[in-house]
Image (cartoon, grey):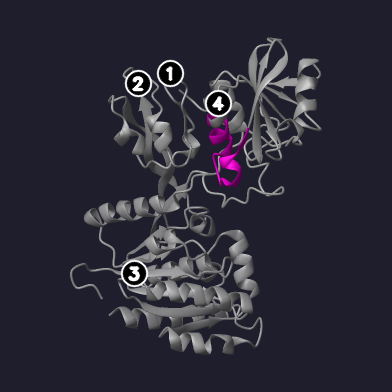
Amino acid sequence: MNRNEIIAVTSQSLDGLNALVDSRFGRCRAFTIVKLQEGKIVEMQAMENPAMMAGGGAGIQAAQLIGNSGATVVLTGNLGPNASSALQGLNITTYIGISGTVESAINAYLKGQLQQIIEPNVPSHFGMGRGGGMGHGGGMGRGGRRGRW
Amino acid sequence: MNPENDFSTIAVTGGKGGTGKTTVAISLAYIFSKHDHKVLFLDCDVDAPNAAILLSAELNEVKLVESYLPKFNENCIGCGDCQNVCQPHSLLNIPEKKPLIFPQMCTGCEACRLICKYNAVEPDLKVIGKILTGSKYGVDLIVGQLEIGEPKSAEIVRAVKKYAEDRLKTKKYDIIMIDTAPGAHCDIIHALEGADIVVSVTEPTPFGSHDLNRILELISYLSSNPHSTIIINRSDLTTQKHLFDEMLEEFHTSVLGEIPMSREVQLSYAEGVPVMEKFPDADICVRFENIYKKLDKAIS
Protein backbone atom coordinates (compact mmCIF):
# COMPACT_ATOMS: atom_id res chain seq x y z
CA MET A 1 0.00 0.00 0.00
CA ASN A 2 1.13 3.48 -0.93
CA ARG A 3 1.65 5.42 2.29
CA ASN A 4 1.43 8.87 0.65
CA GLU A 5 -2.16 9.31 -0.40
CA ILE A 6 -5.45 11.10 0.18
CA ILE A 7 -8.24 8.94 1.61
CA ALA A 8 -11.96 9.73 1.89
CA VAL A 9 -13.97 8.02 4.65
CA THR A 10 -17.78 8.09 4.66
CA SER A 11 -18.83 9.51 8.03
CA GLN A 12 -21.88 10.23 10.15
CA SER A 13 -20.76 13.67 11.30
CA LEU A 14 -18.22 16.44 10.85
CA ASP A 15 -16.25 15.38 13.96
CA GLY A 16 -13.22 14.42 11.93
CA LEU A 17 -11.17 11.44 13.17
CA ASN A 18 -13.60 10.82 16.04
CA ALA A 19 -16.66 10.78 13.79
CA LEU A 20 -18.46 7.45 13.50
CA VAL A 21 -18.24 5.92 10.06
CA ASP A 22 -21.28 5.84 7.76
CA SER A 23 -21.79 2.62 5.81
CA ARG A 24 -23.45 4.46 2.89
CA PHE A 25 -21.47 6.12 0.13
CA GLY A 26 -23.79 8.18 -2.09
CA ARG A 27 -26.04 9.32 0.73
CA CYS A 28 -23.67 9.40 3.69
CA ARG A 29 -23.88 12.43 5.97
CA ALA A 30 -20.31 13.57 5.49
CA PHE A 31 -16.89 12.76 4.10
CA THR A 32 -13.73 12.92 6.16
CA ILE A 33 -10.80 13.51 3.82
CA VAL A 34 -7.45 12.54 5.27
CA LYS A 35 -3.98 13.13 3.79
CA LEU A 36 -1.39 10.50 4.62
CA GLN A 37 2.37 10.94 4.41
CA GLU A 38 4.45 7.86 5.09
CA GLY A 39 1.46 6.28 6.78
CA LYS A 40 0.88 9.22 9.13
CA ILE A 41 -2.14 11.56 9.08
CA VAL A 42 -0.85 15.07 8.24
CA GLU A 43 -4.05 16.83 7.20
CA MET A 44 -7.77 16.31 7.79
CA GLN A 45 -10.88 17.94 6.37
CA ALA A 46 -14.52 17.14 7.12
CA MET A 47 -17.18 18.11 4.61
CA GLU A 48 -20.95 17.63 4.39
CA ASN A 49 -22.27 15.50 1.56
CA PRO A 50 -24.56 17.60 -0.67
CA ALA A 51 -25.84 14.42 -2.32
CA MET A 52 -27.36 13.13 0.92
CA MET A 53 -30.85 14.44 0.07
CA ALA A 54 -30.65 13.65 -3.63
CA GLY A 55 -33.55 11.78 -5.23
CA GLY A 56 -31.32 10.29 -7.89
CA GLY A 57 -27.72 10.38 -9.00
CA ALA A 58 -26.39 10.61 -5.44
CA GLY A 59 -23.60 8.12 -6.12
CA ILE A 60 -22.45 10.06 -9.17
CA GLN A 61 -22.61 13.38 -7.35
CA ALA A 62 -20.70 12.01 -4.35
CA ALA A 63 -18.06 10.42 -6.59
CA GLN A 64 -17.53 13.75 -8.36
CA LEU A 65 -17.03 15.45 -5.01
CA ILE A 66 -14.47 12.83 -3.98
CA GLY A 67 -12.74 13.11 -7.34
CA ASN A 68 -12.49 16.87 -6.99
CA SER A 69 -11.00 16.50 -3.49
CA GLY A 70 -7.99 14.64 -4.86
CA ALA A 71 -8.71 11.46 -2.92
CA THR A 72 -7.55 8.25 -4.62
CA VAL A 73 -8.95 5.86 -2.01
CA VAL A 74 -12.46 5.60 -0.52
CA LEU A 75 -13.26 3.71 2.69
CA THR A 76 -16.95 2.91 3.04
CA GLY A 77 -19.52 0.15 3.65
CA ASN A 78 -21.82 -0.04 0.64
CA LEU A 79 -21.48 0.96 -3.00
CA GLY A 80 -24.39 1.15 -5.44
CA PRO A 81 -24.11 0.60 -9.20
CA ASN A 82 -23.74 4.25 -10.25
CA ALA A 83 -21.22 5.00 -7.49
CA SER A 84 -19.19 1.95 -8.43
CA SER A 85 -18.99 2.92 -12.11
CA ALA A 86 -18.23 6.54 -11.26
CA LEU A 87 -15.41 5.79 -8.82
CA GLN A 88 -13.89 3.34 -11.29
CA GLY A 89 -14.10 5.98 -14.02
CA LEU A 90 -12.16 8.32 -11.77
CA ASN A 91 -9.57 5.62 -10.95
CA ILE A 92 -10.45 5.70 -7.27
CA THR A 93 -10.05 2.47 -5.30
CA THR A 94 -12.75 1.49 -2.82
CA TYR A 95 -12.44 -0.59 0.34
CA ILE A 96 -15.40 -1.75 2.43
CA GLY A 97 -15.96 -3.26 5.84
CA ILE A 98 -15.35 -0.13 7.94
CA SER A 99 -16.65 0.22 11.49
CA GLY A 100 -16.19 2.39 14.52
CA THR A 101 -14.57 5.79 14.09
CA VAL A 102 -12.86 7.34 11.07
CA GLU A 103 -9.55 6.84 12.84
CA SER A 104 -10.16 3.13 13.42
CA ALA A 105 -11.22 2.74 9.79
CA ILE A 106 -7.97 4.27 8.58
CA ASN A 107 -5.96 2.03 10.91
CA ALA A 108 -7.81 -1.02 9.61
CA TYR A 109 -7.00 0.10 6.05
CA LEU A 110 -3.31 0.56 6.84
CA LYS A 111 -3.18 -2.91 8.43
CA GLY A 112 -4.72 -4.42 5.26
CA GLN A 113 -7.85 -5.58 7.10
CA LEU A 114 -10.38 -4.04 4.67
CA GLN A 115 -11.73 -5.64 1.52
CA GLN A 116 -11.30 -3.98 -1.87
CA ILE A 117 -14.37 -4.09 -4.12
CA ILE A 118 -14.73 -3.39 -7.83
CA GLU A 119 -18.42 -4.25 -8.25
CA PRO A 120 -21.42 -2.66 -6.48
CA ASN A 121 -22.48 -4.57 -3.38
CA VAL A 122 -25.94 -2.99 -2.93
CA PRO A 123 -28.67 -2.02 -5.40
CA SER A 124 -29.69 1.52 -6.47
CA HIS A 125 -31.07 3.85 -3.79
CA PHE A 126 -30.09 1.44 -1.01
CA GLY A 127 -29.03 4.24 1.32
CA MET A 128 -32.25 6.20 0.92
CA GLY A 129 -34.51 6.60 3.91
CA ARG A 130 -32.17 5.01 6.41
CA GLY A 131 -31.91 7.92 8.81
CA GLY A 132 -31.88 10.62 6.17
CA GLY A 133 -31.75 11.10 2.41
CA MET A 134 -35.51 11.36 1.68
CA GLY A 135 -35.42 11.97 -2.05
CA HIS A 136 -38.42 12.09 -4.37
CA GLY A 137 -37.22 9.16 -6.40
CA GLY A 138 -36.73 11.00 -9.68
CA GLY A 139 -34.34 9.60 -12.29
CA MET A 140 -34.17 6.03 -11.06
CA GLY A 141 -31.08 4.34 -12.45
CA ARG A 142 -31.15 0.74 -13.61
CA GLY A 143 -29.24 -1.48 -11.22
CA GLY A 144 -25.99 -2.76 -12.67
CA ARG A 145 -25.90 -0.35 -15.60
CA ARG A 146 -22.44 1.04 -16.24
CA GLY A 147 -21.68 4.57 -17.33
CA ARG A 148 -20.18 4.88 -20.79
CA TRP A 149 -17.65 7.04 -22.65
CA MET B 1 -68.49 18.24 -32.44
CA ASN B 2 -65.43 19.35 -34.36
CA PRO B 3 -66.50 21.23 -37.47
CA GLU B 4 -63.01 21.32 -39.03
CA ASN B 5 -62.27 17.64 -38.54
CA ASP B 6 -64.86 14.98 -38.79
CA PHE B 7 -64.04 12.95 -35.73
CA SER B 8 -64.92 13.19 -32.06
CA THR B 9 -62.51 12.35 -29.26
CA ILE B 10 -63.65 10.48 -26.19
CA ALA B 11 -61.10 10.05 -23.40
CA VAL B 12 -61.49 7.55 -20.57
CA THR B 13 -59.70 8.27 -17.32
CA GLY B 14 -60.48 8.00 -13.62
CA GLY B 15 -57.69 8.90 -11.25
CA LYS B 16 -57.90 5.77 -9.18
CA GLY B 17 -56.16 2.74 -10.62
CA GLY B 18 -58.11 -0.46 -11.11
CA THR B 19 -61.56 1.13 -11.41
CA GLY B 20 -62.14 -0.46 -14.80
CA LYS B 21 -60.92 2.38 -17.00
CA THR B 22 -59.36 0.22 -19.71
CA THR B 23 -62.20 -2.30 -19.62
CA VAL B 24 -64.68 0.55 -20.16
CA ALA B 25 -62.52 2.14 -22.85
CA ILE B 26 -62.24 -1.01 -24.94
CA SER B 27 -65.91 -1.84 -24.42
CA LEU B 28 -66.87 1.58 -25.71
CA ALA B 29 -64.50 1.20 -28.66
CA TYR B 30 -66.03 -2.22 -29.37
CA ILE B 31 -69.60 -1.02 -29.27
CA PHE B 32 -68.91 2.06 -31.39
CA SER B 33 -67.25 -0.19 -33.94
CA LYS B 34 -70.23 -2.58 -33.90
CA HIS B 35 -72.44 0.41 -34.70
CA ASP B 36 -70.35 1.03 -37.82
CA HIS B 37 -68.19 3.83 -36.50
CA LYS B 38 -64.54 3.93 -37.57
CA VAL B 39 -62.67 3.83 -34.27
CA LEU B 40 -59.02 4.69 -33.59
CA PHE B 41 -57.96 3.68 -30.07
CA LEU B 42 -54.98 5.38 -28.45
CA ASP B 43 -53.50 3.54 -25.49
CA CYS B 44 -51.86 6.39 -23.57
CA ASP B 45 -51.32 4.41 -20.38
CA VAL B 46 -47.70 4.17 -21.48
CA ASP B 47 -46.32 2.83 -18.18
CA ALA B 48 -48.45 -0.30 -18.51
CA PRO B 49 -50.46 -0.37 -21.74
CA ASN B 50 -53.11 -3.07 -21.38
CA ALA B 51 -55.72 -2.38 -24.03
CA ALA B 52 -54.25 -4.85 -26.53
CA ILE B 53 -54.21 -7.54 -23.85
CA LEU B 54 -57.88 -7.01 -23.01
CA LEU B 55 -58.66 -7.29 -26.72
CA SER B 56 -56.19 -10.11 -27.36
CA ALA B 57 -54.90 -8.03 -30.22
CA GLU B 58 -51.49 -8.64 -31.76
CA LEU B 59 -49.25 -5.62 -31.88
CA ASN B 60 -46.39 -4.68 -34.19
CA GLU B 61 -43.66 -2.30 -33.20
CA VAL B 62 -43.66 0.54 -35.73
CA LYS B 63 -41.57 3.31 -34.24
CA LEU B 64 -39.03 4.03 -31.53
CA VAL B 65 -39.40 7.12 -29.37
CA GLU B 66 -36.03 8.69 -28.80
CA SER B 67 -34.55 11.36 -26.60
CA TYR B 68 -31.30 13.33 -26.81
CA LEU B 69 -28.18 11.95 -25.20
CA PRO B 70 -24.79 13.74 -25.41
CA LYS B 71 -21.83 12.33 -27.28
CA PHE B 72 -18.38 13.86 -26.74
CA ASN B 73 -15.94 14.28 -29.63
CA GLU B 74 -12.18 14.91 -29.83
CA ASN B 75 -12.57 18.64 -29.12
CA CYS B 76 -13.30 17.82 -25.47
CA ILE B 77 -10.59 18.95 -23.05
CA GLY B 78 -12.33 17.73 -19.89
CA CYS B 79 -13.02 21.22 -18.52
CA GLY B 80 -16.07 20.09 -16.51
CA ASP B 81 -18.48 22.89 -17.55
CA CYS B 82 -21.02 20.34 -18.78
CA GLN B 83 -20.81 18.36 -15.54
CA ASN B 84 -21.41 21.53 -13.56
CA VAL B 85 -24.56 22.34 -15.46
CA CYS B 86 -26.01 18.82 -15.58
CA GLN B 87 -29.00 18.82 -13.20
CA PRO B 88 -29.72 15.08 -13.05
CA HIS B 89 -26.01 14.29 -12.44
CA SER B 90 -25.79 12.29 -15.59
CA LEU B 91 -22.19 13.35 -16.33
CA LEU B 92 -19.01 12.66 -14.41
CA ASN B 93 -16.06 14.94 -15.10
CA ILE B 94 -12.79 13.06 -15.44
CA PRO B 95 -10.01 15.69 -15.48
CA GLU B 96 -8.57 16.16 -18.98
CA LYS B 97 -10.67 13.35 -20.38
CA LYS B 98 -14.13 13.06 -21.91
CA PRO B 99 -16.91 12.90 -19.33
CA LEU B 100 -18.37 9.58 -18.27
CA ILE B 101 -22.08 9.49 -19.25
CA PHE B 102 -24.81 7.78 -17.21
CA PRO B 103 -27.49 7.44 -19.93
CA GLN B 104 -30.29 6.30 -17.64
CA MET B 105 -30.04 9.57 -15.64
CA CYS B 106 -30.11 11.87 -18.67
CA THR B 107 -33.38 13.76 -19.18
CA GLY B 108 -32.41 15.17 -22.58
CA CYS B 109 -32.32 18.85 -21.62
CA GLU B 110 -29.22 19.51 -23.82
CA ALA B 111 -27.72 21.96 -21.31
CA CYS B 112 -24.36 20.25 -21.81
CA ARG B 113 -24.46 20.95 -25.52
CA LEU B 114 -25.42 24.58 -24.99
CA ILE B 115 -22.75 25.35 -22.40
CA CYS B 116 -19.79 23.74 -24.18
CA LYS B 117 -17.28 26.31 -25.45
CA TYR B 118 -15.33 23.82 -27.55
CA ASN B 119 -18.04 22.32 -29.79
CA ALA B 120 -17.29 19.01 -28.15
CA VAL B 121 -20.85 17.85 -27.59
CA GLU B 122 -22.82 16.18 -30.36
CA PRO B 123 -26.40 14.91 -30.17
CA ASP B 124 -26.83 11.18 -29.79
CA LEU B 125 -30.08 9.31 -29.26
CA LYS B 126 -31.45 7.12 -26.53
CA VAL B 127 -34.59 5.03 -26.83
CA ILE B 128 -37.16 6.02 -24.19
CA GLY B 129 -40.16 4.15 -25.57
CA LYS B 130 -41.90 2.69 -28.56
CA ILE B 131 -45.10 2.89 -30.61
CA LEU B 132 -46.97 -0.26 -31.56
CA THR B 133 -50.03 -0.74 -33.73
CA GLY B 134 -52.67 -3.39 -34.24
CA SER B 135 -56.32 -3.98 -34.96
CA LYS B 136 -59.15 -6.09 -33.55
CA TYR B 137 -62.95 -6.14 -33.80
CA GLY B 138 -62.72 -3.29 -36.31
CA VAL B 139 -60.87 -1.06 -33.85
CA ASP B 140 -57.44 0.24 -34.89
CA LEU B 141 -54.96 0.53 -32.04
CA ILE B 142 -52.01 2.85 -31.50
CA VAL B 143 -50.16 1.92 -28.31
CA GLY B 144 -47.44 3.84 -26.50
CA GLN B 145 -45.00 1.95 -24.33
CA LEU B 146 -42.43 3.55 -22.05
CA GLU B 147 -39.01 1.91 -21.59
CA ILE B 148 -38.86 0.57 -18.05
CA GLY B 149 -37.29 3.04 -15.63
CA GLU B 150 -37.51 6.07 -17.92
CA PRO B 151 -39.13 9.12 -16.34
CA LYS B 152 -40.65 10.86 -19.35
CA SER B 153 -44.00 9.18 -19.88
CA ALA B 154 -45.53 12.42 -21.17
CA GLU B 155 -43.08 12.28 -24.11
CA ILE B 156 -44.44 8.88 -25.11
CA VAL B 157 -48.03 10.12 -24.86
CA ARG B 158 -47.05 13.01 -27.16
CA ALA B 159 -45.49 10.54 -29.57
CA VAL B 160 -48.70 8.45 -29.62
CA LYS B 161 -50.78 11.51 -30.44
CA LYS B 162 -48.32 12.59 -33.13
CA TYR B 163 -48.48 9.14 -34.71
CA ALA B 164 -52.27 9.33 -34.55
CA GLU B 165 -52.26 12.74 -36.24
CA ASP B 166 -50.21 11.31 -39.10
CA ARG B 167 -52.55 8.30 -39.34
CA LEU B 168 -55.55 10.62 -39.57
CA LYS B 169 -54.09 12.16 -42.71
CA THR B 170 -54.26 8.84 -44.53
CA LYS B 171 -57.23 7.03 -42.99
CA LYS B 172 -60.69 8.20 -42.00
CA TYR B 173 -62.01 7.72 -38.49
CA ASP B 174 -65.01 9.30 -36.82
CA ILE B 175 -64.19 8.29 -33.23
CA ILE B 176 -60.88 8.60 -31.39
CA MET B 177 -60.98 6.69 -28.10
CA ILE B 178 -58.20 7.49 -25.62
CA ASP B 179 -57.25 5.37 -22.61
CA THR B 180 -55.15 7.26 -20.05
CA ALA B 181 -52.97 6.19 -17.15
CA PRO B 182 -54.33 6.26 -13.60
CA GLY B 183 -53.41 9.28 -11.51
CA ALA B 184 -53.51 13.00 -12.14
CA HIS B 185 -50.03 13.81 -13.39
CA CYS B 186 -48.83 15.55 -16.52
CA ASP B 187 -49.03 12.65 -18.92
CA ILE B 188 -52.73 12.38 -18.16
CA ILE B 189 -53.06 16.05 -19.06
CA HIS B 190 -51.28 15.39 -22.34
CA ALA B 191 -53.61 12.48 -23.04
CA LEU B 192 -56.79 14.42 -22.20
CA GLU B 193 -56.06 17.68 -24.01
CA GLY B 194 -58.22 18.05 -27.10
CA ALA B 195 -60.85 15.54 -25.96
CA ASP B 196 -64.47 16.45 -26.65
CA ILE B 197 -65.83 14.19 -23.94
CA VAL B 198 -64.02 12.85 -20.88
CA VAL B 199 -65.43 9.81 -19.11
CA SER B 200 -64.08 9.27 -15.60
CA VAL B 201 -64.53 5.75 -14.32
CA THR B 202 -64.96 5.49 -10.58
CA GLU B 203 -66.34 3.22 -7.87
CA PRO B 204 -68.69 4.04 -4.98
CA THR B 205 -66.10 3.97 -2.19
CA PRO B 206 -64.13 6.62 -0.30
CA PHE B 207 -61.07 5.70 -2.42
CA GLY B 208 -63.01 6.15 -5.62
CA SER B 209 -64.52 9.39 -4.42
CA HIS B 210 -61.21 10.88 -3.30
CA ASP B 211 -59.44 10.14 -6.56
CA LEU B 212 -62.43 11.19 -8.64
CA ASN B 213 -62.34 14.61 -7.02
CA ARG B 214 -58.73 15.01 -8.12
CA ILE B 215 -59.33 13.98 -11.69
CA LEU B 216 -62.46 16.14 -12.03
CA GLU B 217 -60.45 19.10 -10.82
CA LEU B 218 -57.75 18.34 -13.37
CA ILE B 219 -60.35 18.06 -16.13
CA SER B 220 -61.71 21.48 -15.21
CA TYR B 221 -58.28 22.95 -16.06
CA LEU B 222 -58.14 21.53 -19.57
CA SER B 223 -58.12 24.25 -22.19
CA SER B 224 -60.29 22.21 -24.57
CA ASN B 225 -63.11 22.44 -22.00
CA PRO B 226 -64.53 18.97 -22.60
CA HIS B 227 -67.91 17.66 -21.61
CA SER B 228 -67.26 15.82 -18.33
CA THR B 229 -69.10 12.63 -17.35
CA ILE B 230 -68.60 9.68 -15.02
CA ILE B 231 -69.33 5.99 -15.07
CA ILE B 232 -69.85 4.36 -11.70
CA ASN B 233 -68.31 0.93 -12.02
CA ARG B 234 -69.00 -1.81 -9.46
CA SER B 235 -72.02 0.35 -8.67
CA ASP B 236 -73.57 -2.25 -6.34
CA LEU B 237 -70.38 -2.65 -4.28
CA THR B 238 -71.73 -0.23 -1.69
CA THR B 239 -74.71 2.06 -1.15
CA GLN B 240 -72.44 5.10 -1.09
CA LYS B 241 -73.21 6.68 -4.45
CA HIS B 242 -74.24 9.85 -2.61
CA LEU B 243 -70.50 10.44 -2.05
CA PHE B 244 -70.44 11.89 -5.54
CA ASP B 245 -73.45 14.24 -5.42
CA GLU B 246 -71.71 17.43 -4.30
CA MET B 247 -68.68 16.80 -6.49
CA LEU B 248 -70.77 16.25 -9.60
CA GLU B 249 -72.52 19.54 -9.07
CA GLU B 250 -69.32 21.43 -8.33
CA PHE B 251 -67.64 20.22 -11.51
CA HIS B 252 -70.73 20.25 -13.78
CA THR B 253 -70.35 16.55 -14.37
CA SER B 254 -73.12 14.12 -15.25
CA VAL B 255 -73.46 10.39 -14.69
CA LEU B 256 -73.20 8.56 -17.98
CA GLY B 257 -74.09 5.19 -16.51
CA GLU B 258 -73.71 2.67 -13.75
CA ILE B 259 -72.25 -0.79 -14.13
CA PRO B 260 -72.93 -3.33 -11.40
CA MET B 261 -70.45 -6.09 -10.65
CA SER B 262 -70.88 -9.09 -12.87
CA ARG B 263 -69.31 -12.45 -13.35
CA GLU B 264 -69.41 -11.88 -17.11
CA VAL B 265 -67.08 -8.90 -16.83
CA GLN B 266 -64.67 -10.81 -14.62
CA LEU B 267 -64.53 -13.84 -16.90
CA SER B 268 -64.17 -11.91 -20.14
CA TYR B 269 -61.56 -9.57 -18.62
CA ALA B 270 -59.53 -12.55 -17.46
CA GLU B 271 -59.70 -14.06 -20.92
CA GLY B 272 -58.91 -10.91 -22.84
CA VAL B 273 -62.18 -10.72 -24.76
CA PRO B 274 -64.58 -7.75 -24.68
CA VAL B 275 -67.54 -8.71 -22.48
CA MET B 276 -70.08 -7.94 -25.21
CA GLU B 277 -68.27 -10.32 -27.56
CA LYS B 278 -68.23 -13.20 -25.11
CA PHE B 279 -71.61 -12.63 -23.43
CA PRO B 280 -73.83 -10.82 -25.96
CA ASP B 281 -76.99 -11.50 -23.93
CA ALA B 282 -75.72 -10.30 -20.55
CA ASP B 283 -77.27 -7.35 -18.72
CA ILE B 284 -74.04 -5.43 -19.09
CA CYS B 285 -74.56 -5.24 -22.83
CA VAL B 286 -77.76 -3.31 -22.27
CA ARG B 287 -75.93 -0.94 -19.96
CA PHE B 288 -73.21 -0.30 -22.51
CA GLU B 289 -75.82 0.11 -25.25
CA ASN B 290 -77.47 2.87 -23.21
CA ILE B 291 -74.10 4.50 -22.56
CA TYR B 292 -73.33 4.29 -26.27
CA LYS B 293 -76.65 5.97 -27.14
CA LYS B 294 -75.97 8.85 -24.74
CA LEU B 295 -72.47 9.37 -26.11
CA ASP B 296 -73.58 9.11 -29.71
CA LYS B 297 -76.21 11.75 -29.03
CA ALA B 298 -73.72 14.03 -27.27
CA ILE B 299 -71.37 13.78 -30.24
CA SER B 300 -73.84 14.75 -32.96
Marks 3 and 2 sit apart, C-alpha to C-alpha, by 48 Å
Find disc 2 in the rendering and name its residue.
B76
Marks 1 and 3 sit apart, C-alpha to C-alpha, by 51 Å
N-terminal-most mark, 2 or 1: 2
Position of residue B17 measured from the top left corner of the image (x, y, whole percent): 57, 65
Label 2 element class: loop
Q: Quadrant of residue B270?
A: bottom right
> What is the chain identity of the residue bearing mark 2?
B
**Mark number displayed over residue B97:** 1
Label 4 element class: helix
Which quarter of the rendering shows the C terminus of chain B?
A: bottom left
* Disc 2 residue crowd, few under 14, some 14–19, many 20+, Cα 10 Å: some
* Disc 1 residue crowd, few under 14, some 14–19, many 20+, Cα 10 Å: some
Looking at the rendered structure, the kind of residue marked 2 is: Cys
Q: Residue at x 30, y 53 (%)?
A: B162
Establish if B216 lies above or below A50. Answer: below
Front disc: 2 or 4: 4
